[in-house]
Image (cartoon, grey):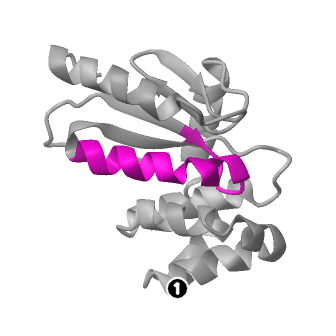
Amino acid sequence: MSDSSPDRPAAPVLDVWCELQCPDCRSALDDLRALRARYSDRLELRLRHFPLEKHKHAFAAAQAAEEALEQGKGWEYVEAVLGRVEELDRKGEPFLIEVARELGLDAEEFDIALIDGRHILIVDADQAEGKAIGVTGTPTYVIDGERLDGGKSQEGLRARIEEIADRLLADGTGA
């Protein structure tokens, strides 16, 4: 899931390997909001799905996030679900549809998307790519080839991301 549009000039890319049932990813929300506010369209934030087996609703949540993106509210949906991880734990897939409804999205289409699996290939591809580059937990950030693991601590990660992004923007090297 990406903030970019096809006609935008190349911006540095920050891949955020995330899982929507992950409390550590919820903790990372403030940093992601700050990065989005600071860089706006000068830094492309791409949410990459990495559902962990220990969270039984994470795979469905990743598919739901893709449906929200398709309906025009990807990041809003991600933030809403991450902000209420405990409810997702308790309620499961009905909660994903409830959040869609709260955001004014087509909840019926969400339900159908979760049943027909139209977004499974995107989630599977993200997860496979994550494994290939050594992602083992969430959140994990990748910018300019550097992998930063936020699963143990977010301490200092935003500063490091900003340092790299600022260098890339100053150099004009983009991604």
The percent position of residue 26, horizontal first and vertical second, equals: 62, 55
Q: Position of residue 55 (x, y in %)?
A: 81, 53
Asked whether the viewer can see residue 144, the reply is yes
Relative to 30, is 49 on the left or the right?
Answer: right
Q: Residue at x 60, y 18 (%)?
A: 133
From which residue to which does the magenta span run? 17-40
Amino acid found under the numbered disc labelled 1 = Arg
Residue 38 painted magenta: yes
Which of 107/46 is in front?
Answer: 46
Viewed as shown, does residue 87 lie left or right of 167? Answer: right
Is residue 172 among the parts visible in the rendering? no
Q: Is residue 82 left or right of residue 29?
A: right
The residue drawn where x is 40% and y is 63% is 70
Badge 1 element: helix
Mark 1, Cα crowd under 10 Å, few <14 / some 14-19 / many 20+, is: some
The percent coordinates of residue 18 (x first, y second) are 60, 44
Q: Residue at x 36, y 29 (%)?
A: 162
Q: Is residue 92 above or below residue 117?
A: below
Magenta stretch containing residue 60, yes or no?
A: no
Give the main secondary structure of the magenta stretch: helix
Work out whether 111 lies above or below 67. below
Q: In the image as oriented, which residue stretches furthest toward the right?
A: 54
> Circle 1 sits on which residue?
101
For the C terminus, give its image quadrant: top left
